Image: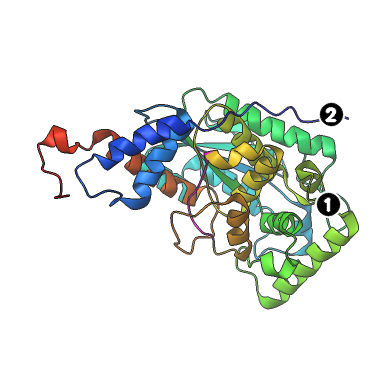
Amino acid sequence: MKELVVPKIKSFFEDKMREAKVRLDNLTKPKESLGRLEELAQKVVGITGKLTPKVKNKIVITMAADHGVAEEGVSAYPQEVTKQMVYNFIHGGAGINVLSNYIGAKVIVVDMGVKGELNISHPNFRVQKINQGTKNFLHEPAMSREQAVEAIERGMKVMEEEEEVDIVGVGDMGIGNTTSASAIIAVISGEEVEKVTGRGTGIDDVTFSRKVEIIEKALSLHQPKPEDPIDVLSKVGGFEIGGIAGVVLQACSRRIPVVIDGFISTAGALLASKIEPKVKHYLIASHLSQEVGHKIMLKELNLTPLLDLNLRLGEGTGAVLGMGLVEAGVRIYNEMATFEEAGVSRKNE
C-alpha cells in the first residue's frame, strides 16, 4: 500500500529570534508596546531564518471539493454551489478576491474534487482532482487510504510549483465540509460530537441535530484512529482538507510562514501537524471562527488567533486579513528606526 513521503521540516531558528527581539526592543517605542505585531515579526524571523525577512510575495491557495455527505442535507446550500463558487473565484467576484486584492495577494484556486467538470482556462486555476467528490461517509469511508495520501501529495505539488512565495494562506470551498471538519476534530480531540459541531452555512435546529447524528453514526461505523491522521482523513475527511494538509507540509519544508483561515483550513493544518509535529511552529492562526469546534482545534495546535470578527465564510478570507497583520509586523521590524538611529532619548532607568 502506498504511504505518504513527508518532506523534511527543520526546527525554528531560535538564535535568530533572539536577535530579532533585541532589535524590536531597541525600536523607538516602549518595549513590547506593539504587542502581537512584534511577536509576528519575531516568528517570521524564526521561521525563515532571515534577519531582514520580507512579506512581499503573498498567495492564498483555496482548495475546492465536494462531499458525499452533502446528500444528507447537512448544509443550507445545494451541492452545486461548490462548482458555482469556483467560477466566482476565477471571475474575481467572491469575498476572497476582494480581500486578496486589498492586501495584494494572488489567489490560486484548486479543483481537488469538485463534482462535475470545470471548463476553466486561467493562469491561477489548478486541476488536481482526485474524484467527483468524496463518498457519503454516513454509509462508507469518504475515500480510500490511497486517495487520502494522493490528496495530500497533490496539495504538496501545488505548493511546490509556486516558486516565489514569502507567505501563504490556505482556504477552502466545499458544501458539506464543516461536517467533515467536525468529525475530524471530534476524533482527534475525543470531545463529544455535539460540542465540536457548528451551524456551517447557517442551518436550522432540525438540520443541526441531523448533522450531529450523522457524524456520530459515521464515527461509530468507521472507527477512525486518532493516532493515524491519514486514517481519519480517509474515513471522514475531504479532498480539499487533504490538499490543505499537503500545502501546509510543503510550505513548512520551505520555511514559508502559513496563515490558516477558519474551521476547514485548520482541520487540514491539524492533520498536517499530526503527520509532522514541527508544523505547529510554522502556523499563524488568522482568526477565531464562529464554528464551535474551531477553538478546540486551535487549542490542539497551541495557537492564539489574531482576530475575532465572527467570520464563518471560509475561502481563505480570514487568512488574507491575517497576512496583512503579519506584513504590518514585519514592516515595523524592518523599517522603524531604533533610538540610536533616530537620536531619541531612552526612558530614565
Which image quarter is the N terminus in? top right
Q: Residues within 10 Å of mark 2 (few under 14, many from 20)?
A: few
The image's mark for residue 267 is none
The image's mark for residue 2 is 2
Give the residue type that dot 1 points to: Pro
Q: Secondary structure at mark 2?
A: loop
Q: Nearer the viewer, residue 293 or 111?
A: 293
The image's mark for residue 224 is 1
Report the Cα–Cα distance between label 1 and label 2.
Answer: 19 Å
Give the residue type that dot 2 points to: Lys
Residue 111: where, in percent of width, then height? Answer: 65, 38
Res 251 quadrant in image:
top right
Q: Are marks 1 and 2 in contact (CB under 8 Å)?
A: no
- Total number of numbered labels? 2
Q: Residues within 10 Å of mark 1 (few under 14, many from 20)?
A: many
Of the residues under marks 1 and 2, which one precedes in the sequence?
2
In reply to whether residue 293 is colored magenta, the answer given is no
Residue at the farthest front position: 349
**Residue pictured at 62% horizontal, 34% vertical:** 249
Residues in magenta? 282-289
